[in-house]
Image: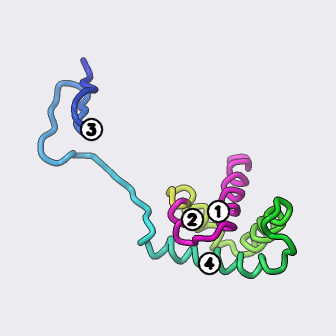
Amino acid sequence: MTFNFHAPVGQVIAGDQTVTGDNIGTQNNYYGIDDPNTQQLANELVEILQGIVPQISDPTSEAGKEIITAAAMEEIENKPTLKDRLVAALTAGAFEAIKKIAKNDFVEVFLTAFKAGLEAKPKK
C-alpha cells in the first residue's frame, strides 16, 4: 500500500480505492461569528465584565486583570448553565469567535484563564 501525499488537498486516499464525486466523509465544523449561541455567550460575558471592570481602580494592570478574572470566574461559578455553555464552547473551538464578537480585551484575558483553569482540573 502506498500513499500519494502529492495529490491535491482533499484527495489523499489511503489504499487502492478511488473516491469520486464529492469528498465523501469530509466533515468541516465552523463556529463563526454568525452563530447566535456564540453571539449570546459573548454578550453575556461582556455584560458580566462591564459590571466588574468599573469597580477596579487600575483594570489594565496585571493585578487588575487578575482581580477581574477572579471576580468573573466567581460569578460564572454561580451560573452553572453559563459555565456549561462556556465549557461546550471551549470543546467546540468557539473561543476565537467569542473573542471576535466581544471586541473586549478583558474577554480575551478571561477566556484564556478559564481555559487554563479547565485544563488544570483533573479529569473525572
Q: Secondary structure at mark 4?
A: helix
Which residue carries the number 1 mark? 108
Q: In the image, which residues are magenta?
A: 96-124
Which residue carries the number 4 mark? 44
- Asked whether the residues under the numbered discs 4 and 3 touch, taking CB atoms below 8 Å apart as contact, a structural biologist would say no
Q: Secondary structure at mark 2?
A: helix
Q: Secondary structure at mark 3?
A: loop
Q: Residue at x 51, y 75 (%)?
A: 39
- Label 3 vs 2, first from the N-terminus: 3
> Residue 23 vs residue 55: left or right?
left
Q: Residue at x 64, y 74 (%)?
A: 45
Q: Give the quadrant of the N terminus.
A: top left
Instruction: Name the amino acid type tagged 2.
Output: Lys
Which residue carries the number 2 mark? 99
Single out the mark in the foreground, 4 or 2. Answer: 2
Which residue carries the number 3 mark? 9
